[in-house]
Structures are given as C-alpha cells and as structure tokens.
Image (cartoon, rainbow, N blue to C red):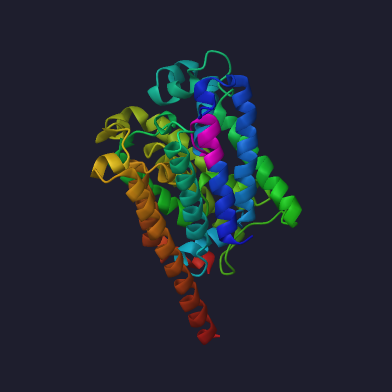
Amino acid sequence: MNPYLAGIGLGLVLLAAFVIMGRGLGASGAFSTLVSVGVAKVAPEHASGNAFYGQYLASESNPFKDWLVFEVIGVFVGGFLSGVLAGRIKRSTEKGPSISVRSRLTFAFLGGGLMGFGAKLARGCTSGQALTGGALLNVGSWAFMMCVFAGAYALAYVMRRQWQ
Amino acid sequence: MNAPFFKFGLFNDEVSLIVAVVIGIGFGFFLERAGFGSARKLAAQFYFTDMTVLKVMFTAIVTAMLGVYFLSVLGFVDLSLVYLTPTNLMPQVVGGLLLGFGFVIGGYCPGTSCVSAATGRTDGWVYLGGIVAGILVFGEAFPLIETFYNSTPMGQLTLAQLTGIPYGILVFAVVVMAIGAFMAADWGEKVMAAKKGGKA
C-alpha cells in the first residue's frame, strides 16, 4: 500500500481511539501485564512488593481485563487478516543475505530486550509515545521520538551486515 | 454530542474492551498494509534506502493531530479529557535511545513485532520473547532505578504550554515540518537508488 495512504489509515485509527476512548494506542503495556501476572504466579510476595508489577496487578478481578491487552490481541488479528488478504503469511525469518538465521534470531532477541527495557523507562513505545503523544504535541513524546531516531541511526553502521 | 465518548460515560468498561479489539484490528491491519511485518523494510529506514517508516509515521501523526485539533476547535472533543502521558524528560531521553538501539538491532518495535509474528515470521516471535525478557529485567531492577524513572518530572505538558506558542500555530508547524521531511525522504531514496544503480 502507498505509505501515505497507510499513514492516513493508521492516523484515523488513532483519531478513533482519541474520540471514542479518550486515549491513544499502545503495544508494550500489554506485555507488561503479561510479565507482571507471570511473576505474580511464580512469586506472589515478590510481585506484590514491587511497585512496577503492582501497577499492572491493581485490578481486583482479572489483570488481563485490560484495555491494552485487548487492543494488542486485535493487533495480532488485524495483522493476520491483512497478511492473509495480501498473501503474505509465510513461515520465514526476515534478514539480510549475509547473516545466518541463528545470528539474526540472536540479534532479534537482544533488540527486543533493549526495546522492552527502554519502553518501560520511557513510559511507552513507538505506539504509546511517538504516535499517540506525537499527535497530542506531548513534550516528552517528541523528545522520545527524536531520541529513537538518533539511537537507531547512531548504531545503523555497526549493524549494517545484518540488513544489507 | 460530547467526546471522548468513554469519558462521558456513553458505554461501560466491558464495551470498552470490545472497542479495544476493534481499534487493535485497525491498528494491526494498517501496520501490515504498510509492510511493517518485515524487519528488512523497517530497518531500511536507517540506511535511507526505503523511508516508508518516516512517511507512514508522520502521515499518521499529522492525520490524528489535525483531526483531534479541528474536532476540539469545533467543540466536539474535549481535548483536556484525552489522556496525556506525563513527561519525565531524562528517563524518556535515555529510554528513547535504548529503543532506537533495539529497533536497528532487532528490526522491530513492539507493535510491528506483533504484526510480524502474526504473519508467521520467526524473528518476530523471538523479538517478542526479547521484549518480555527486557520488561522482566526492568521489573526486577525497578527498586534500583525507581529514582531515575521518576526524575525530571514536568507533568502533563504539551509543546504549546512549554513554549507559549498557540496550539494551532504548532499544529501548522508540524504539518510544514512533515511535508519537508517527506520531500527530503523522497530525495534521499532517489540518491540511494542512484548510488546502488551506479555500483551495479
């Protein structure tokens, strides 16, 4: 799809979230709930003594009855539907021609780890901060967005063998 | 009619979860449409060969920004009821840099890795595993970094409040900046394509 059309589509979805819910989009928050519930299952006292896990376990009934958890389930469904319609569902690993699958997956795990840690420190990721806060002219979100691009471009040369 | 609808009690929490799934489907659909299920497509942004990430992101920001601004000027949406994440400048700067490193190392961000996993990419699933591990490390380290996490608090703050420039003027400035960025992106892609063609 033309990138500007896809951008308008994404923007209208975000606008719908503002108008209907009074909040923006998110992604990493759902995984915080998952991690917090997991920790609480394994070590309940440890989890309840930790302020970070605590905020995701506050709901008295079921912590998974959370807006972002349901939204992210939707993201999986929507991505799958679009992939089916475009014939893009394929068991594969995305990588450049000069790197092995094993190395690529190691980098994927490492990158995901940095992303998970960074997103929590920044109070959101590309969806919750850059897109949502960007459209609301949020000061922290714009500072965050500039730093995401700065960080990625700073390491791009080092990582070039993985992609090119 | 008053919006945001949920904040005016037009529907309850249970219904809000159905809304969440529908909005999520739209979000995932357009991420996949943009080609963001592919780490190579996303990473190409950082080598100036394919600037789709910048184009999609800024078009989305401009669309939602203009929409919510005009709806608030018309009195349809109460912008003060749309949740604004509080700014804590230093942790957001450091977190942003870490996210940028993670983006070019792993090839995704959280939302796009969900779409990648949903379309069968192994690296997308592994990346999601990495996110879970990263959040777990953050959670375990939280007592040690809590002070930094809460440092440099500026509260819920818009660029208009920070600079004193009227909101509408800033909206216009972002639109102008985005158009400039789109033109620069198209030019960059042409330069890189010519360079590649010259090599081959």
In what quadrant of the picture does the C terminus of chain B appear? bottom right
Q: Is residue B22 left or right of residue B196?
A: right
User: Which residues, given as a range, are shown in magenta?
Assistant: A15-27
On the image, the x and y values in percent for residue B104 come to: 46, 57
Residue B19: percent from the left, percent from the top?
A: 62, 30
Is residue A31 visible in the rendered structure shown here?
no
The image quarter in which residue A1 lies: bottom right
Q: Which residue is drawn at 27% across and 39% down?
A: B161
Q: Is residue A83 visible?
A: yes
Q: Residue at x 40, y 64 (%)?
A: B180
Q: Is residue B49 above or below residue B136?
A: below
Q: Which residue is drawn at 42% across and 30% down?
A: B139
Instruction: Please state which of residues B55 and B92 is positioned toward the viewer in this rendering.
Output: B55
Using the image as rendered, state which of residue A94 and residue B152 is in the foreground.
B152
**Depth check, front residue: A82 or A93:** A82
* Residue A25, magenta (yes or no): yes
* Front-most of residues B84 and B100: B84
**Which residue does the image show at 72% across and 46% down from the upper left?**
A81
Image position of A36 with respect to A74: above or below: above
Say above or below: B164 vs A53: below
Quarter of the figure with the N terminus of chain B: top right
Q: Where is residue B151 in the image (x, y as percent from the top left)?
A: 26, 34
